[in-house]
Image (cartoon, rainbow, N blue to C red):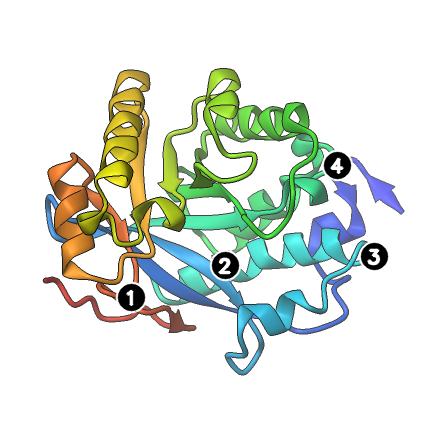
Amino acid sequence: MTTSTGCSACRDGKALDFPISVAFQPIVDMRTRSVFAHESLVRGPEGQSAASVLSQVNAANLYPFDQMCRIKALEWASRLQIPAMLSINFMPNAVYKPETCIRATLDAAERYAFPLDRIIFEVTEQEQVLDIDHLTSILRAYRKQGFMTAIDDFGAGYAGLNLLADFQPDLIKLDMGLIRGIDQDSVRQVLVEGTVKICRTLGIEIIAEGIETLGELQALQSLGIDLFQGYLLARPGFESLPDIAYP
């Protein structure tokens, strides 16, 4: 049954047929050595891996799964009193109509008293996006609501210059394939340097994710990147905010 705020699954998020929870991994601003945002990452109810959860997702439950991920992120962000931005992954193929599908998020944010202006919607890398026009329409609708937007895995698959030509998000996350071992790879350095220049011109901030070594961090800082996420700084904390090991 549908209502003015969408179907019941969208409205109350109770249609998912298996339990989930979340972990949080910080995105660190090395300029101020502080947390810029915490990304919500899906986990099983006892902390099982994201892969074990995603193996249960199919065409029949994709929509309620996407909705429940948003609700759980807001619930735990409120419980933990996250002081920074909250990055919520979403699956574009699970969003039928952005203005309707956002209702559960708005309702959950109100229920858990989490400020809307501290939410980032990040396109997840878990699915192939076949309709770029649909993706950009979602991102525009979310921006209209006042949310920040982020594109994950920039430089891989759909997340490239063609997408930037149609929509300029607030943030992009560099694909880990571009930054792995960048301190030892002059070609990757040139590619990332060019991306930094483009994003500065367009007013887009870059996040380097998957940082594992001090060498990678320092190389990327020298190229003008300030926001970082990865095991070097902190592993995800299940239903908790992990401590950060600043180098």
The kind of residue tagged 2 is Ala
Residue found at x 20% / y 66%: 244
Q: Distance of mark 2 from mark 3, alpha carbons?
A: 22 Å
Residue 163 in sight from this viewpoint: yes
**Image coords of residue 6 (percent x, y):** 77, 40
**Image coords of residue 45 (percent x, y):** 57, 78
Of 30 and 24, the residue lying toward us: 30
How many residues crowd mark 4 within 10 Å: few (<14), some (14–19), many (20+)?
few
Residue 82 in sight from this viewpoint: no
Say the numbered circle drawn on residue 99.
none
Up-down: is 244 above or below 218?
below
Up-down: is 130 above or below 70?
above
Q: Secondary structure at mark 2?
A: helix
Q: Are marks 2 and 3 in contact (CB under 8 Å)?
A: no
Residue on which disc 1 sits = 231
Of tags 2 and 3, the one toward the viewer is 3
Up-down: is 137 above or below 231?
above
**Image coords of residue 159 (percent x, y):** 50, 34
Q: Distance of mark 1 from mark 4, alpha carbons?
A: 35 Å
Residue on which disc 2 sits = 73
Residue on which disc 4 sits = 96
How many residues crowd mark 1 within 10 Å: few (<14), some (14–19), many (20+)?
some
Of 103 and 39, the residue lying toward us: 39
Residue on which disc 3 sits = 60
- Counting residues from the start of the chain, the first of labels 2 and 3 encountered is 3
